Amino acid sequence: MIPLRDNIPSDNFPVITVVIIAINVFVFLFLQGPSFSLSAGDNVETKPVVEYGAIPYRITHPGDDCAIATVTTTGGQEIVCEGEPDYPPGAEPNIKNPPAYLTIFTSMFMHGGWVHIIFNMLFLWVFGNNIEDAMGKLKFAIFYLLGGIVAALAQVAIDPSSTIPQIGASGAIAAVLGGYALLYPRARVLTLFFLFFIFLLEIPAMLLLGLWILLQFLPAVGQLSSPDISGQGGVAYFAHIGGFLFGLAAIKLFAHRRSTRYGQPRYPVY
């Protein structure tokens, strides 16, 4: 289920949306490196993710540093933090440990792979322009960052002892989706579906985004039922849910107008 475009043309060029996409792509290609594998240990491509991803343990234990170390119980290299049993006594961190609050922001502009960033940026491009129109540039930038913060903290609250870095713009983009669902529920979105075959279908935004958030809730419930959430890694579903709920709750505080083209049967022209 991939959105391709909606039927609400932008009233203005979406400057902030484009800037956010450009920053994400730049960080992924030139600062982070186009791969993500914690099993690589000290690999230089892994370090930026560990250093600037939002590690829940660091956020809930301010001042405790983390390192990449060989864990005696498994023999593999993992992220361990001060105060944990596997943290080597007297060890000096072998990675940077920027302030934990800073990583909440930096993690929003990092991604775990090509599919991750391509789909995130596509969703932002399709839905972000109309939300930016509704808020104005400054308010949209604030809304986006606040959505990312709430999303990151929602995931941290579910698993505060995890040492797996949280990365991705998904939580902030989920806030945009939540806002869009309330602001433009009857907008039509041309969507690519993959079932037994591939087909295109134009469906209401509320239906598309309702299905999307449902697909976040179902695995999130499964994660809650697991005795070891931190050991699963993977998708931060609660960040998506937290961001989406923030968007629903905050859209009326930030948005001051709807597009005059809302409801007109035309595709967007950028």
Image (cartoon, rainbow, N blue to C red):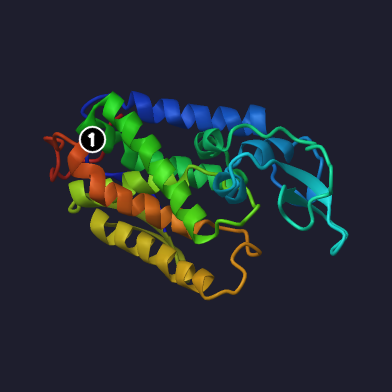
**Toward the viewer: 229 or 113?**
229
* Residue drawn 40% across the image and 60% down it: 199
- Image position, residue 265 (x, y; %): 16, 45
Q: Position of residue 248 (x, y in %)?
A: 26, 51
Q: Residue at left 36%, top 61%?
A: 213
**Mark 1, residue position:** 9
Q: Where in the figure is residue 86, as x and y percent of width and height?
A: 79, 56
Specify whether residue 55 is in view. Answer: yes
Quadrant showing the C terminus: top left
Say whether residue 172 is visible: no
Q: At 37% across and 42% down in the image, what residue appears?
A: 147
Q: Is mark 1 on a helix, strand or loop?
A: loop
Residue at 55% over, 31% down: 25
Displayed quadrant of residue 26: top right
Q: Position of residue 195 (x, y in %)?
A: 45, 69
Q: Locate the N terminus by quadrant.
A: bottom left
Would residue 79 appear left or right of 160 to someone viewing this image? Answer: right
Mark 1 Cα-neighbour bin, 10 Å: few <14, some 14–19, many ≥20: many
Q: In the image shown, does 246 or 2 lie closer to the viewer?
A: 246
- Is 69 situated left or right of 103 in this image? right
Depth order, front residue of 109/258? 109
Instruction: Classify 258 as above or below 38.
Output: above
Asked if residue 20 is positioned above or below residue 210 in the image, the reply reads above
